[in-house]
Image (tube, grey):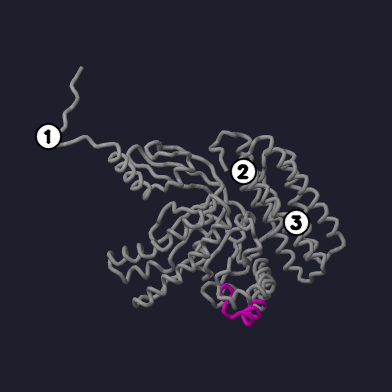
């Protein structure tokens, strides 16, 4: 038997407590680079067990936050001043995110990407708290002689893949998926509209307490390389109280103007926007739209009608019965829009009944298939179905109450019915279709 290696003279073996302390410090140091929450979501309790290619699917709300005009601001500072500024700002935001059940996945320059595994409402509450914390931070900057900064926040909810990527010598934890790309897109749009928080229709339909939030429709946007347009919503609870009240009071006036814009009637849109601006002059978004409608403005975009969506084979779910119902629903929704546009209201009641009945049967079939297959995202899918009926009933009430603005109604049919259906098909239904074909790919946790 070989002899045990001897210790240098005067050196005693480390005791258990000392080794435990060193291990705890090492683990704590690693957690500053790899969030413990990320490892827990991967089902890992020890960073030494992390391997390349580990992955899991989760429902997640993604929050992107960015400093406005940071490039111009950074050019006025030295490299050391840049780092000092960024760290002084980021150290303000990290505890706010943690306090709302989120964690920071990564810093991207001056941007923060945070993940919220729980309720999307917590991500919205976090956004509100970040804006309040920014006010305190800006008070300190002004006292020190620096100008205040502004931030924009984009929030989206969806199914993402968390996992490890890289090579043998260097790996990283990351989150990938369309939901991440849309959240980043929303954050960039906050700069265009000069608003603080934008959320997607996916987040709106996933909220546990939608009545808690001051929300309004703001635009339609596309993500590069993806089908369908997404409705974009502003959350304006953090505006000055007088502006919050004014936006709530004029919500329908604002949306009527935007409806004209999105159906391509810029003349009518401009007149309605002028009327709205007179009522709410401090609303930054209305001035963005006014520039869009002004042929002399640099941001002018020639009128372009956004047509109603029609069925494409790539919308197929893979279950023939469900695909047929989706086709019938989309055709009926387009017929409803045409009837409203032509002021032919005699058949709208029957058509609305038909849409509701087909949607109810379709959703019941999908729920049964999900239950039988053990689909892990059943609750998220069912929540979106629930929201559809809520908005359907709201729209039906407007139609049956004698609403006379046909352009407004047609646009709401497109947003709440046909637009919802197409986005639901290409995201939620498509994901379920993939699961049916391969229930082992990847992950099984909600």
Looking at this view, is 84 or 422 the one in front? 84
Numbered disc total: 3
Residue ID at (58%, 76%): 241
Looking at this view, is 8 or 172 the one in front? 8
- Residue 285 counted in the magenta span: yes
Q: Quadrant of residue 81?
A: bottom left
Give the residue pinned by disc 3: 334
Q: Secondary structure at mark 3?
A: helix
Q: Quadrant of the C terminus?
A: top right
In this rendering, the label closer to the viewer, 2 or 3: 2
Residue ID at (57%, 72%): 285
What main secondary structure does the magenta stretch of the protein show? helix
Give the residue pinned by disc 1: 9
> What residue range appears in magenta?
272-288
Dot 2 or dot 3: first in sequence order is: 3
Mark 1 Cα-neighbour bin, 10 Å: few <14, some 14–19, many ≥20: few
In this rendering, the label closer to the viewer, 3 or 1: 1
Dot 1 or dot 2: first in sequence order is: 1
Give the residue pinned by disc 2: 377
Q: What is the CA distance from the residue labelled 3 to the residue labelled 1?
A: 87 Å
Q: Which mark is residue 152?
A: none
Residue ID at (37%, 37%): 48
Q: Are marks 2 and 3 in contact (CB under 8 Å)?
A: no
Dot 3 or dot 1: first in sequence order is: 1
Q: Secondary structure at mark 2?
A: loop
């Amino acid at each position: 038997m070989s002899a045990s290696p001897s210790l240098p003279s005067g050196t005693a073996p480390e005791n258990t407590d000392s080794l435990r302390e060193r291990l705890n410090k090492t683990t704590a140091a690693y957690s500053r680079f790899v969030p413990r929450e990320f490892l827990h979501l991967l089902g890992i309790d020890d960073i030494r067990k992390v391997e390349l290619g580990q992955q899991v699917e989760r429902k997640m709300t993604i929050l992107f936050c960015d400093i406005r005009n940071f490039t111009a601001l950074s050019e006025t500072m030295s490299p050391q001043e840049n780092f000092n500024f960024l760290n002084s700002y980021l150290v303000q935001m990290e505890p706010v995110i943690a306090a709302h059940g989120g964690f920071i996945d990564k810093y991207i320059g001056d941007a923060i990407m945070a993940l919220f595994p729980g309720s999307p409402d917590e991500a919205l509450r976090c956004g509100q708290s970040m804006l309040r914390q920014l006010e305190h931070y800006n008070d300190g900057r002004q006292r020190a002689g620096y100008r205040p900064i502004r931030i924009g926040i984009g929030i989206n909810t969806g199914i993402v893949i968390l996992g490890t990527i890289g090579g043998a010598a260097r790996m990283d934890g990351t989150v990938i998926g369309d939901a991440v790309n849309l959240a980043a897109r929303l954050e960039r749009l906050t700069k265009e509209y000069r608003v603080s928080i934008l959320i997607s229709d996916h987040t709106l339909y996933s909220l546990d307490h939608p009545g808690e939030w001051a929300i309004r429709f703001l635009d339609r946007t596309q993500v590069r390389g993806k089908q369908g347009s997404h409705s974009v919503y502003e959350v304006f609870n953090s505006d000055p109280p007088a502006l919050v009240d004014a936006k709530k009071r004029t919500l329908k006036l604002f949306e009527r103007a935007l409806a004209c814009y999105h159906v391509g009637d810029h003349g009518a849109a401009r007149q309605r926007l002028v009327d709205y601006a007179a009522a709410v002059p401090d609303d930054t978004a209305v001035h963005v739209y006014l520039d869009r409608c002004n042929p002399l403005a640099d941001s002018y975009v020639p009128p372009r009608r956004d047509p109603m969506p029609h069925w494409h084979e790539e919308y197929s779910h893979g279950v023939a019965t469900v695909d047929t119902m989706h086709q019938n629903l989309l055709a009926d929704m387009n017929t409803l829009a045409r009837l409203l546009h032509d002021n032919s209201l005699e058949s709208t009641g029957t058509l609305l009944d038909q849409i509701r009945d087909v949607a109810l049967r379709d959703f019941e079939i999908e729920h049964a298939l999900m239950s039988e297959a053990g689909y892990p995202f059943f609750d998220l899918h069912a929540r979106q179905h629930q929201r559809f009926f809520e908005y359907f009933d709201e729209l039906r009430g407007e139609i049956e109450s004698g609403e006379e603005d046909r352009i407004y109604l047609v646009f709401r049919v497109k947003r709440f019915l046909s637009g919802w259906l197409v986005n639901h098909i290409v995201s939620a239904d498509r994901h379920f279709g993939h699961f049916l074909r391969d229930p082992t790919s990847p992950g099984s946790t909600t």
